[in-house]
Each structure stands twice: as C-alpha cells, then as structure tokens.
Image (tube, helix red, strand yellow):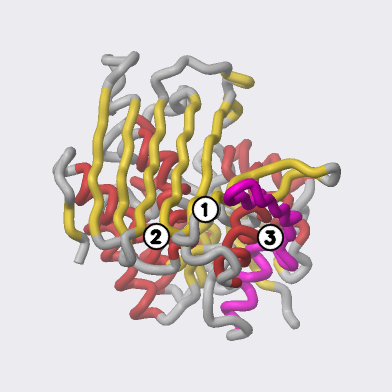
Amino acid sequence: MKSLQLGIVGCGDFLRLQKPSIDKTTAVKVAGLYDPMQERSQAYTKDWSDARIYESAEALIDDPVIDAVAIFVPPWLRKPLLVRAAQNGKHIITTKPLAPSIADCEAMVEAVDSAGVTAAVIYNRTDSALVQTLKTILESGEFGRLALYKQDWLHHYPHWNTWALDPEKNGGPFMDAMIHNLNIARYLMGREATQGTFFSDRHAHPDLPCADTESLKLDFPGNSSAHLFITWAADLHLLEEGGNYREHFDIWYAITDQGWRLTSGKTNEGTCIAASRMGENKRFPLNPADETHFEEFIGRIHGKTDCWRNLASIPEAAQDIRIIRESSARPGTRVDFS
C-alpha cells in the first residue's frame, strides 16, 4: 500500500509531541512542511529529509502530491485552512479545540461532509492506554454503567503565548485544557450530554483576560453526570519557559450505577485501573493501543473501521465547542443542549 503523503501546517510545540507517533507509523511519509517561522519547519528536515518546505500553508494544501494535511495551528487560525483542505480533497487531522466559535465549527463540519474526506481531532484520549482500558472495562458491563465521572486539573496558565488566554481566540482554561476531559467524559459515557451548568472565577489572577478557574457539571441520560474542574489560580512550577512544560496535578475517579469506584492505581508492573466496592478490590493492567492514532486515521481513510476510538470526529469536536460556548454564556444556569 502506498504511503500516505502527509503535509504538516504548523511546526511548533504540538508537532514535537506528535513526532514519535508519526515516525512510528510506517504508512505515513512526511512530504511537506510549513510554518511562518521557516526555521521551525527547516529543523524537522533533519529527520524528514524528503519533506519539502513550502512558502505558504495554501501552497502546501493545494499541492496534488499531498494526500492528507495535519493542521497544527492555533484554533482561531484553523477554519480557513481546514475548509480549503477539505475542498481540495485532502484528509485532515488536527487538534483541540477545533475552533473558538460554534459558527466556525459548523463551517468545518459542512466542508468535511460536503467533500467526503476523512477528518479527525487529537485529544488527550488519543493513544491513552488508561482511557482506552477504562473504556473497555465499562463496555464489558462487569461493573455496571458509568454514573459519575469526576476530574480536577491544576496547572499554571499558558505563559508562552497570548492567544490561549484570549476569550475570542481560545477561551480560557476550560476551552484551552479541560476540553480534553470534557471529550473523555462524553466518550466514556457513550451517550450524548443533555444539559450543562458552568461556573467561572478569578481567584488569584485578576489581570488575566479570562477567568483563572472554571468548572462544568454535565448531565447525561440515566441520572448520570460529569463534574469537570480546572484552575490556573495556583502559580505552579514552570519546568521550561519556551513551551508546554509545567507542573500538573490530575485528580480523577469514576463511579458506576452499581457503586463501583474506578480510578488509577499502582501494581508492581506500573499504573493500572483500580476498581473497589465494599472492601473488594480488582486491578486491571493498562492495555496499550495496538496501533498509533495515525494508523487509526489511515485505517479510517481506507474503510477498515467505522468508529473512532483514539481520535474524535469533526462533529464530535464541534459538539465539545457548542457545550462550552452555550453553557459558559449563561453561567450558573442549567443549559439544555437538545
């Protein structure tokens, strides 16, 4: 099978994180690179020697040599690039948040649907052995149905750029980061959220253009909910000034309708899923994915699978934006998503 000729638009910090998966996927060949700071795209030719450096994102997207485009740019720049790629018949892989507005998301969904291309979004559930193992456990029905998902995140605000703090370009802590866990909650629940109640506060950083603390209670059918909380209020340790290297705390657990608590645990072999109820304890080793998310992406292109696990669809990612925007527009009010 011919290798997928991949063009990458945006060679910043996110590409650094994606590079190992790209390199591991033998059916992908990086054929083109573009970044407005050409030295960043040029740096990757050390490993991807056959990749052409393009003078513009549009030139890369328009090149018939390119089969698929990885759009790794900030969300407020994404819509015209994604729409252009779809209209050129390119398959698309990008990252969260899909766009800063519901209208932008709707335009992207329409472009992808009209073109009939494969398009997917990377989240923290992507290549996560913990999330995928938990999903498999819940799908087995051994412990009942997921009734409550709770996750708290604490880390420093994104100091390395300004757009992540801009409500018009990104949206603040929930849109920037907690959207990962909103998507995970929806994925694990396996049913659509019906209502949401949003709260925001400025506890320690009144000069930020956005709140430093936000939370969302998300309701699902069957008397189920997700409670998602994030704060940038604590000035935690910055491990490196130039990118997304910062001290991070993650507190999570899940409870089923049969009273089981599931959370992360430890065994001699490493991290596991720990299940407990009334003194009974079970441990499940994490099962790494059989394939990278780029392999899943290629499999979807060739019709080998009809559902996303590692990746989210464009409509799914658009619904994440709708949930955040509609609930945050009416803080403290239970908003109906039907």
Asked if labels 1 and 2 touch by Cβ distance under 8 angstroms, the answer is yes
**Residue occupying image coordinates x 34% and y 80%:** 114
Say whether residue 39 is magenta: no
State the mark number for residue 30. 3
Residue that carries the numbered disc 2 in the rendered image:
317
Q: Residues in magenta?
A: 273-302
| Amino acid carrying mark 2 in the image | Ala
In the foreground, 80 or 59: 80
**Residue occupying image coordinates x 62% and y 50%:** 276
In the foreground, 288 or 48: 288
Question: Residue 318 falls in which quadrant of the image?
Answer: bottom left
Q: Earlier in the sequence, mark 2 or mark 3?
A: 3
Q: Residue furthest right?
A: 268
Q: In the image, is residue 18 above or below residue 111?
A: above
| Amino acid carrying mark 3 in the image | Val
Asked if labels 3 and 2 touch by Cβ distance under 8 angstroms, the answer is no
Q: Earlier in the sequence, mark 2 or mark 1?
A: 1
In this rendering, position of residue 109 left or right of residue 269: left
| Amino acid carrying mark 1 in the image | Tyr
Residue that carries the numbered disc 1 in the rendered image:
123
Residue 325 in view: yes
Look at the numbered disc 3 and give the secondary structure of its residue: strand
Question: Mark 1 Cα within 10 Å, few/some/many (few <14, many 20+)?
Answer: many
